[in-house]
Amino acid sequence: MSKNLHAVIMGFNRVGGYDDELYFPPLQFAEKDAYDLYHILTDKDSCNIPREYVSLIVGKVPSHEDIQDEIYSKINPKRNTVDTILFYYSGYAFSIGDKPEVFLALPNMSMLKIFENPMVALKSALPISFLGNNFFRGQSSNGAKNKILLLDCYDCGRFHSKAKDNDKTRLSYLTEEHEFNSEDTVVLVSMHKMITTKEGEELRNGIFTFDLITGLLGTAIGDRGEVTVNSLIAYLQDTMPSPIQPTRYGTRFPRITLNSTKDIPVSILTQRTQKQKEYYEAIQQLYIQSSIKLKVFLSYSSTDKDRVRDIYQKLSLEKEVVPWFNEKSLLPGEDWELEIKKAIKSSDAVIVFLSKRSINKEGHVQKEIKQALDLADEKPEGTIFIIPARLEDCDVPPGLQRWQWLNVYEPDFYDKLITALKRRSHDLAVKNAGVQ
């Protein structure tokens, strides 16, 4: 192993407070990912990097400024052109704003405050530009020549309504804006449309990190009997199935040895590769299931039809959503009451639109709510099924108060709604595929 490698390893299971869990559902293994990678890198029988060369940052940490100071002090000053620096992050990534910046989420940030003022993200999350400006753009007289950036990101999507093709926009910005494509820099990014598909109960790691560690242990050995940066990346890209293959930036990279041990733990590798095979079969099925569109029933009073119609039209443009809106979904001559019952029963989610008039009005809306409540009682605890949506400042009926409601009149309403529907879609895909 090269004794000139210096690293910062970060992993966070939880981001923000209780109110942030809608956007960042707590992760199980992000911190374990970081611990496991730290152990492999510093283990004398594996990568054998001196412990004083590696920083581990996990759990509830100090301020965002303290994290930046730790990163800066570890891998920027006193490095020279024979050194290699490695930065690894396991957790959530997101972007926000009309000219989106990409951020790595930190434990003490608050999305509610960021919604109110996107500039808050610069002081509470870790901008990719911070890494680009300080470590990955060009060379300096006292900087490390070779740089490795590994992002195992559980992407929860963009939080602004102008975003269209989320993943392509984000990845294009990451590579083009920060100029990571160079001969002395390699970036490996794992970002997907769904929220938590990369964690597996069977693997006890994120999928990307599980394979990363398996490769470091010896399965990524190259032609000279060593695990190098290039042989490791080639192994990851060849091994991981197409739906979840990581994306590489940086076309060429010097030969940097990560593990030169000849004593490969065969039994451990055999066990890990068997887990890979079993899990990948399940994950392929998950992505097949995830292509199924989410059926969403819109319940509202006739007096609120115009306002709900606008939301229906926006939902109709979402590739993964099929909204049911009686004005558009009912055919002439159909028994509308029967069709509504059938639509609610077959729906994956029900959005109940509330207004001052609708909550006091008798009729079919109350029947729809009652049917939805009965179906909700049959769902597993924690399922997103009923989503109350207030069209104006009004009371929420007692039967609906146990669910967090949305306020249609707030600027971030639609982004929150799509985040909730993505979470529901993901949960259904996991259930149908049998993946935990």
Image (cartoon, helix red, strand yellow):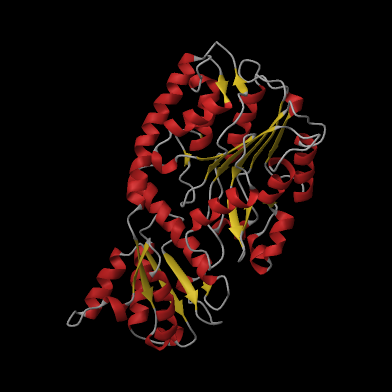
- 186 vs 317, nearest the viewer: 186
Residue furthest toward the top?
Answer: 263
- Determine the residue positioned at 63% across, 46% down: 179
Which x, y percent locates residue 168? Answer: 49, 54
Quadrant where the N terminus lies? top right
Q: Quadrant of residue 386?
A: bottom left
Q: Is residue 299 depicted above or below 36 in this figure?
A: below
Residue 246 visible in the current orientation: yes
- In the image: residue 114, left or right of residue 21: right
- Residue 286, horizontal then vertical, whole percent: 36, 45
Asked whether, in this view, residue 304 is left or right of residue 88, the answer is left
Toward the viewer: 349 or 177? Answer: 177
Instruction: Tell me: 203 left or right of 146.
Output: left
- Residue 160 appears at what percent x and percent y? 56, 66
- Residue 402, visible in the rendered structure: no
Q: Quadrant of the C terminus?
A: top left
Q: Residue at x 39, y 40 (%)?
A: 242
Image quadrant where residue 305 sits: bottom left
